[in-house]
Image (tube, rainbow, N blue to C red):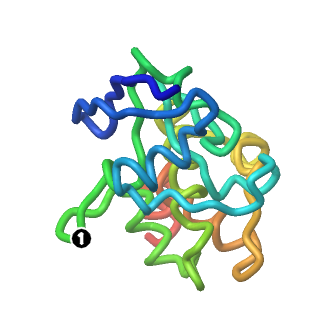
Amino acid sequence: MKRILSLKVNGNSYEVAINPWQTLLDVLRNELGLIGTKKGCDIGTCGVCTVIMDGKAILSCLTLAIECEGHTISTIEGIGTAESLHPVQKSFIENGAVQCGYCTPGIVMTAKALLDENPKPDDDEIKDALSGTFCRCTGHIKIMEAVKKVSQPEDEEKSNV
């Protein structure tokens, strides 16, 4: 039996009829049309489906949509636009941290959640935050560099002087 669910996603309120077993990932993609969040492994090991709920990175493939009522959710569509990229998105492009792009939304959301909580993470903190994400194309060196450039922009400028 379907249930009406109220969700707040990217600053917008939605009411959607869902089955109690539907994941947040499936509701975002199939009911709300927010297809930037990708389905990867569907068992919580790749991080491709990462979104931010109440400031924390979560795996939307393992989260029941019904558990998200009353929470604030952000997806890749909600953090920037083509005209005004989020600093993490811009850094990923500038530092070559994207190739096929399939995993990029989840990794960007993971990095954003880290930087929102800790604007100046060290290498170990970045590695720890990204440990739940997996990119088959770029490897993680360029991804690490992109996150570091967002978190330490003035440090880079000092070293270039």
- The residue located at (24%, 34%) in the rendering is 11
Residue 138 in which image quadrant: bottom right
Residue closest to the far left: 83
Q: Nearer the viewer, residue 24 or 154?
A: 24
Q: Is residue 148 visible?
A: no
- Residue 108 point in image, percent of width and height: 52, 56
Compared across the picture, whether 7 is left or right of 113 comes to: left
Q: Give the SS element for disc 1.
A: loop
From what the image shows, is residue 51 above or below residue 19? below
From what the image shows, is residue 100 above or below residue 131? below
From what the image shows, is residue 8 above or below residue 140? above
Q: Nearer the viewer, residue 31 or 139?
A: 31
- The residue located at (76%, 63%) in the rendering is 134
Q: Amino acid at mark 1?
A: Ala
- The residue located at (52%, 26%) in the rendering is 1
Q: Which residue is mark 1?
A: 82
Q: Nearer the viewer, residue 95 or 135?
A: 135
Can you say which quadrant of the picture contains the C terminus?
bottom left
- The residue located at (46%, 34%) in the rendering is 18
- Residue 133 point in image, percent of width and height: 73, 55
Q: Is residue 21 visible?
A: yes
Compared across the picture, whether 99 is left or right of 73 comes to: right
From what the image shows, is residue 117 above or below residue 150? above
- Residue 158 point in image, percent of width and height: 46, 60
- Residue 76 point in image, percent of width and height: 41, 54
Compared across the picture, whether 144 is left or right of 75 comes to: right
